[in-house]
């Protein structure tokens, strides 16, 4: 069995390779790629492998771009940190996944799943991934948040939220009308709840709505300076490592 690994974190890719070879000494890792560009080139010019382990977030954007540029005829085990809705989409489409950080048992179970799908290897075809990709690229997300202010509970519609941010060590909602509400969830939890197509985690302190973005400027050290339609307490800067993913997210409308 020939396998390729598509993963932009070199340590993770090496760890995955070691686990694969310890479980299946007879397989060959015929390629490792860190980007959409490199993956497309390899899948276009070389014989496609028997199995692909693929990260979702790559160095130059989301892996779904690969499927738009080249026909992939290999079964895929996605490496992901997506929420349960997305995981269910994987299950329904017969493609397995492993959650990061993964263990040897996770990879072993992935192989068992692939082994049970003999048609993958006999026919060299996989189910249509278009519905899966649509669901993963634009999940519905949480529609509203329950908040408590002035001794009253109320709900805030997610579409009315310009951004979430951390203020005084607490998560806070900033609405387009400049109303603010405190939340009990952490910003990490909120990030998993909202639509990844509509909201982007620009840094540790801010999660912004696409509709709130006014303009983007180049900044020092290859960073991006993001300006919103309403003023933010802090300057929103995106580091150079996250810039490709952010620009891909902006373009993917």
Image (cartoon, rainbow, N blue to C red):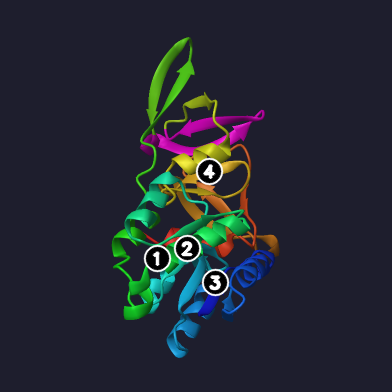
Query: Would you name the residue on which mark 4 appears?
Result: 207
For image coordinates 63% across by 41% down, the residue present is 234
Task: Determine which of the numbered discs, if any, sits on residue 6 in the image.
Answer: 3
Do labels 1 and 2 touch, CB within 8 Å? yes
Judged left or right of residue 119, residue 217 is right
Quarter of the figure with residue 30: bottom right
The residue lying toward the viewer, choosing from 48 and 130, is 48
Magenta highlight range: 158-176
Magenta residue check for 173: yes
- The answer for how far apart the CA atoms under marks 3 and 4 are is 27 Å
Judged left or right of residue 22, residue 162 is left
Q: Is residue 45 above or below residue 57?
A: below
Closer to viewer: mark 3 or mark 2: 2
Task: Determine which of the numbered discs, if any, sits on residue 112 in the image.
Answer: 2
Query: Would you name the residue on which mark 1 appears?
Result: 116
For label 4, the SS is strand
For image coordinates 50% across by 31% down, the residue present is 173
- The answer for how far apart the CA atoms under marks 1 and 2 are is 6 Å
The residue lying toward the viewer, choosing from 50 and 82, is 50
* Percent of width and height locating residue 183: 53, 26
Label located before the other in sequence (1 or 4): 1
Label located before the other in sequence (3 or 1): 3
Q: Is residue 232 above or below residue 104?
A: above
The quadrant of the rendering that contains the C terminus is bottom left
């Amino acid at each position: 069995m020939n396998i390729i690994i598509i993963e932009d974190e070199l340590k993770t890719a090496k760890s995955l390779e070691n686990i694969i070879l310890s479980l299946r000494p007879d397989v060959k890792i015929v390629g490792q790629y860190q980007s959409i560009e490199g993956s497309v080139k390899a899948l276009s010019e070389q014989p496609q492998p028997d199995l692909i382990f693929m990260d979702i977030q790559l160095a130059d954007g989301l892996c779904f771009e690969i499927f738009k540029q080249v026909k992939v005829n290999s079964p895929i085990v996605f490496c992901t940190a997506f929420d349960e809705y997305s995981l269910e989409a994987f299950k329904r489409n017969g493609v397995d996944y492993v959650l990061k950080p993964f263990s040897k048992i996770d990879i072993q179970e992935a192989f068992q799943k692939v082994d049970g799908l003999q048609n993958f290897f006999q026919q060299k075809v996989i189910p249509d991934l278009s519905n899966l990709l649509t669901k993963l690229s634009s999940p519905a997300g949480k529609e509203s948040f329950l908040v408590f202010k002035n001794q009253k509970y109320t709900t805030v519609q997610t579409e009315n939220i310009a951004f979430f941010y951390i203020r005084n060590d607490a998560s806070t909602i900033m609405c387009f009308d400049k109303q603010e509400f405190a939340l009990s969830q952490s910003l990490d939890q909120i990030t998993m709840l909202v639509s990844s197509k509509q909201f982007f985690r620009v840094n540790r302190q801010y999660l912004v709505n696409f509709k709130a973005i006014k303009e983007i400027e180049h900044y020092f050290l290859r960073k991006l300076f993001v300006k919103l339609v309403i003023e933010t307490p802090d300057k929103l800067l995106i580091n150079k490592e996250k810039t490709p993913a952010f620009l891909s997210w902006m373009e993917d409308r």
